[in-house]
Amino acid sequence: MKLDDNSKEIILKKSKFLLHNNFKLIEITDATITFSNKKIAFVIGYERYDNVSNINIKFLEENEMFNLG
């Protein structure tokens, strides 16, 4: 599923605390918004080909990702 413009705007507004904690907006796609501080990445959006929203935390050095649902 795709993130519509309204959803993207809400996510960006609600995730401003990440920007204030040294995370940077890395990528915005049709399905995800990604923030990273070069050690951890938060991937917010929809699972590919599904109508289920989720948040994934990726530990970049370990290349491990955990789904928070």
Image: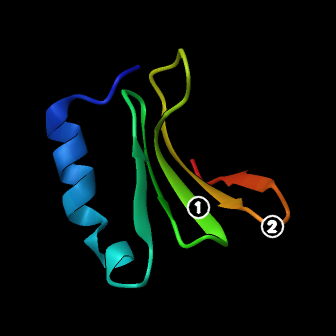
Secondary structure under the numbered disc 1 in the rendered image:
strand
Color theme of the render = rainbow
Q: Measure how far apart labels 1 and 2 are at the Cα level.
A: 11 Å
Answer with left or right where residue 48 lies relative to residue 10: right
Q: Nearer the viewer, residue 67 or 38?
A: 38
Q: Based on the displayed image, in which of its 4 quarters is residue 30 positioned? A: top left
Q: Based on the displayed image, in which of its 4 quarters is residue 2 positioned? A: top left
Identify the residue at image location x=48%, y=30%: 52
Q: Position of residue 47 (x, y in %)?
A: 55, 29
Q: Position of residue 67 (x, y in %)?
A: 66, 49
Identify the residue at image location x=19%, y=61%: 13
Q: Three-letter amino acid code at disc 1?
A: Ala
- Residue farthest to the right? 62
Task: Residue 7: give its label.
Answer: none
Answer with left or right where residue 38 lies relative to residue 27: right
- Dot 1: within a 10 Å radius of its alpha carbon, few (fewer than 14), some, or many (20 or more) residues? many
Answer with left or right where residue 23 lies relative to residue 6: right
- Residue farthest to the top? 49
Q: Three-letter amino acid code at disc 2?
A: Glu
Q: Are marks 1 and 2 in contact (CB under 8 Å)?
A: no
Q: Nearer the viewer, residue 19 or 69?
A: 19
- Dot 2: within a 10 Å radius of its alpha carbon, few (fewer than 14), some, or many (20 or more) residues? few
Q: Nearer the viewer, residue 13 or 29?
A: 29
Examine the rendered structure and indicate whether residue 47 appears above or below residue 12: above
Examine the rendered structure and indicate whether residue 60 appears above or below residue 3: below
Examine the rendered structure and indicate whether residue 5 appears above or below residue 69: above
Residue placed under numbered mark 1 in the picture: 41
Residue placed under numbered mark 2 in the picture: 61
Q: Based on the displayed image, in which of its 4 quarters is residue 18 positioned? A: bottom left
Secondary structure under the numbered disc 2 in the rendered image:
loop
